[in-house]
């Protein structure tokens, strides 16, 4: 489904090459100062244009069409829309019969009986994450000024040396290939006590949203998978004061599915972009045999570069939903 949330409930809509994409959010409290300029900073972080990102450039101008009056939220559903202006739909015509490997082309046809919009990936496109970023801006306002997010890419193409990333991306681009990466998001200022175990624990809700982001293939909190290689004496986080501060933070700010007041730490693995220009041998359903597929269109060499703010937004949305339940 395309709706998520309990108290902070969002619905994302649109297709990559349709008229619009956007988000509608129910449960936004009245009286929050909000204008279209508030979205600019995070939308800029998601925007294409840097080396390794798609040549497709959209204005990504947000239009608040409901839920706001005189610069404040009204308490009614908030809707933000974005126009699609730069589309080359013809680049995707052959993918109906010759679907891209590791992309949604074929599975979407199976699920929707061929009625899905295949242009640019349709509703499965990363373009739909514009709505999540917009919702993340609103979520951060609900969390308040005392809550701060620090998100950075910590790995690209298997390398953690930032000085080498440009060369790795350039090499992949020249090879008509793509590379993945890892994003780390840290959140300070979240009070202890958020989370609704078992099934709406902080990790459960955050991971649900993070895995909804296209290209995300792994999520971990705190020490994550490294915890499996540690002893209890190594992994435990001793409490050192009455406010619950811990001397270490292997739990990533979440214990028993509930925030403990320490910094929340989440890491997200982003796969290499499925759409690459290099020829690939994959099944052609019209000719009923494996043939070379050369993908046209404009695609990111490293989608991780633009996914960082989307992951941050997903985490903010989950935390805002839990805050409104508290």
Image: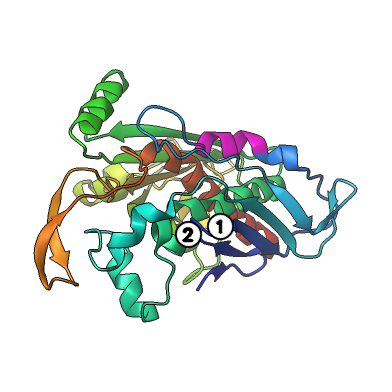
Q: Residue at x 51, y 39 (%)?
A: 46
Q: On the picture, is 290 further left or further right than 222? A: left
Q: Is residue 191 visible in the rendered structure shown here?
A: no
* Residue that badge 1 annotates: 318
Q: Is residue 189 visible in the rendered structure shown here?
A: yes
Question: Dot 1: what SS?
Answer: helix
Observer-nearest residue: 265 or 50? Answer: 50
Residue 115 drawn at (x, y percent): 42, 77
* Residue that badge 2 annotates: 209
Q: Which secondary structure class fits the magenta region best?
A: helix
Q: On the picture, is 106 further left or further right than 130? A: left
Q: Residue at x 78, y 45 (%)?
A: 34
- Cβ–Cβ below 8 Å for labels 1 and 2? yes
Mark 1 → mark 2, Cα distance in angstroms = 7 Å
N-terminal label among 1 and 2: 2
Question: Dot 2: what SS?
Answer: helix
């Amino acid at each position: 489904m395309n709706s998520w949330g309990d108290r902070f409930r969002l619905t994302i809509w649109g297709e990559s090459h349709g008229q619009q994409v956007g988000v509608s959010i129910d449960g936004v409290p009245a009286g929050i100062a909000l204008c279209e300029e508030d979205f600019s900073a995070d939308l800029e972080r998601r925007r294409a244009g840097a080396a390794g990102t798609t040549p497709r450039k959209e204005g990504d101008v947000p239009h608040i069409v409901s839920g706001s009056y005189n610069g404040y939220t009204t308490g009614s559903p908030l809707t933000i829309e974005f126009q699609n202006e730069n589309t080359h739909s013809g680049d995707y015509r052959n993918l109906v019969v010759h679907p891209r490997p590791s992309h949604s082309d074929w599975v979407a046809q199976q699920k929707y009986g061929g009625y899905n919009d295949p242009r640019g990936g349709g509703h499965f496109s990363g373009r739909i994450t514009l709505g999540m970023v917009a919702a993340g801006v609103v979520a951060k306002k609900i969390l308040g000024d005392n809550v701060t997010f620090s998100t950075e890419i910590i790995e690209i193409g298997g390398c953690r040396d930032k000085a080498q990333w440009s060369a790795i991306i350039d090499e992949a681009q020249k090879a008509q290939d793509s590379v993945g990466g890892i994003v780390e998001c840290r959140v300070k200022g979240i009070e202890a006590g958020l989370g609704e175990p078992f099934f709406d624990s902080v990790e459960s809700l955050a991971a649900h949203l993070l895995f909804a982001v296209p290209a995300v293939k792994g999520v971990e909190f705190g020490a994550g998978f490294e915890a499996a290689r540690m002893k209890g004496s190594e992994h435990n986080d001793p409490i050192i004061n009455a406010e619950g501060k811990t001397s270490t933070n292997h739990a990533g700010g979440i214990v028993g599915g509930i925030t403990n007041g320490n910094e929340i730490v989440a890491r997200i693995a982003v796969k290499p972009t499925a759409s690459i220009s290099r020829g690939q041998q994959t099944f052609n359903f019209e000719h009923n045999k494996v043939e070379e597929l050369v993908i046209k269109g404009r695609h990111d060499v490293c989608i991780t570069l633009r996914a960082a703010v989307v992951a941050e937004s997903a985490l903010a949305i989950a935390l805002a939903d839990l805050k409104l339940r508290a």
